[in-house]
Structures are given as C-alpha cells and as structure tokens.
Image (cartoon, rainbow, N blue to C red):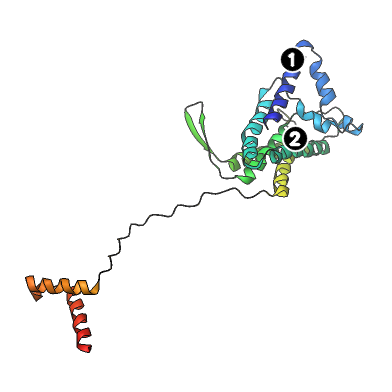
Amino acid sequence: MPLLAGMLAAAFALQVAGEAGWQAAASWSEATLGLTPAAWQAGEYWRLASYGMIHSTTNLFHLGLVLAAVLGPGMALARELGPRLPLGAWVAGQLLGGLCWLSFHRDAGELHFGATAGAYAVLATYVVRHPDRVFRLLVFFLLPLQLRPRTVLLALLGGEAFFLLIGEVLQQPLPFAPAASAHLAGAVAGWLVLRVSRPAPPERPEPVPARIDAPDPEPERDPRAELDRILDKINQTGLGSLTPAERRTLATARALLSRR
C-alpha cells in the first residue's frame, strides 16, 4: 500500500509540474489518460487502468481523500491480512467503478478521472471486516470525537446514493457532479473482494470473567485431633463451653464408640 500511495503521489507531482510548465498539460493528460465514452467506444480499454492516476490539481481533497483511504484502512488491512487483499480491492474498485460510470454516461464529451472508486473499495473492505472498531479523533486538536467505520461509510454511501439519483438517474443540475455511480460501484467491489477471499475472522479478545470474592473454604481437620481438642476444652472450661458444632462432633464420636 505505501507503494500505491507513492505512485499516486508521484503521478500527481508530475501532473502539477506539467501544468506549471505547459498550460495545455491539464487538458492533454485528461484527454489522454481520462476515461471517456468516446475512448471506450474506440477500443481504448486500457484507460480503465490509467484514469485513476490523474486527479484534480485545483481540489487537493480529491487526492487527499484517496491517500487517506490507502494509508489508513488500506495499511491496517495490509498489516492484518497482507497487502494483496487491500490492493485487490483497490484494483477491483477502479475497474468496476469505471465500468459503472460508463453505463450511466454515454455522451462523448463526458470525462471521468481519479481513484476515488478504489478508495471506496478499500474503505468498504475495512468496514465490513471491522464495522464497530472505534476511532478517536481530535477535531482542530480540541474537540474529541469518536467515530465508527460503519457510521462513516453509511453516511458517505447515503450521500452518494442521493447524488446518483438526482444527478445521474434524473439528470438534474447540481452545484457539482460527483461520479456517484463509480463511487458506489467501488464500495460494492470492496465488499465482493472480501466475500470472495474469505479471510479468517478477526481475532477478538476473550472476555475477562468477573471476579467473585468467595470465602476461602475451611481446611479439613483430622477427626481424632478434633476430638482431642474438644475433650481438652471440656477439661479446661467445662461442657457448657462447647459450641453446637463441637457438641455434634462429640455426639458423633460417642455414637461410634457405642457401636463398637
């Protein structure tokens, strides 16, 4: 996963440097590497692999959220299960996300790029495996906040479903046009990768049993020694000083002697 993050960051650095030295670099990279219906109809299927290597240079959140998913949930999955599963989820998310986007967009001039679908795939894979793991954050280094991965993913998917319905199904104008179809397909791809790979369930700490402070059992006494002690007590303090338990012990001893 660090290699994937490094590749995405290096590609972004080259993209920024190219646009700084050549004004037409932005349109060239998008037209050459981005995913478009026209390129797909022309047989340029390799763009399913290239469109995730370019990102918006005017909105750093585009790449920042992708890197956060790769280096956060992706690294956690790699440490737990090895790098193949999160990397496979990212690749599957990009492929399925690109194909799903193409199914909703048929106009030749439309364009899609970025690795957000792969980020959704990695996040969904992690959430399905660890839905209730709690993350603690300090918002602005002051406000403590607890988040569960399942809550974050459901909120994101709810927003993407809204944008899919309004922007891509009903084709109503929106202030911005997120590729909701690609993002939702990426999340589905992550879930499918985890289902197909069937890794061992995560280890759960064994519950610690509650401590019950019970009184220590009384040590067993030698019957003969106990009888001698009771007789010594009678000689010293009289028969009336015996406890009920000592009287029962003495009566039991007399019954055994009488049987003999």
Q: Residue furthest right?
A: 42
Name the quarter where the C terminus is drawn: bottom left
Q: Position of residue 174 (x, y in %)?
A: 72, 30
Viewer-proximal residue, 160 or 140? Answer: 140
Residue on which disc 2 sits: 167
Q: Amino acid at mark 1?
A: Ala
Residue on which disc 1 sits: 17
Q: Which badge, 1 or 2, is on the more N-terminal residue?
A: 1
Name the quarter where the N terminus is drawn: top right
Can residue 202 be seen here? The reply is yes
- Eyeballing the image, is 79 above or below 176? below
Q: Assign a secondary structure to mark 2.
A: helix
Q: Amino acid at mark 2?
A: Gly
Q: Position of residue 19 (x, y in %)?
A: 76, 15
- Please identify the quarter of the rendering in which residue 37 is found: top right
- Please identify the quarter of the rendering in which residue 181 is found: top right
Q: Position of residue 108 (x, y in %)?
A: 87, 29
Can you tell which of label 1 and label 2 is closer to the viewer? 1
Q: Assign a secondary structure to mark 1.
A: helix
Q: Is residue 130 left or right of 120 when viewed as pictured?
A: left
Q: Residues within 10 Å of mark 1 (few under 14, many from 20)?
A: few
Task: Residue 135: give its label.
Answer: none
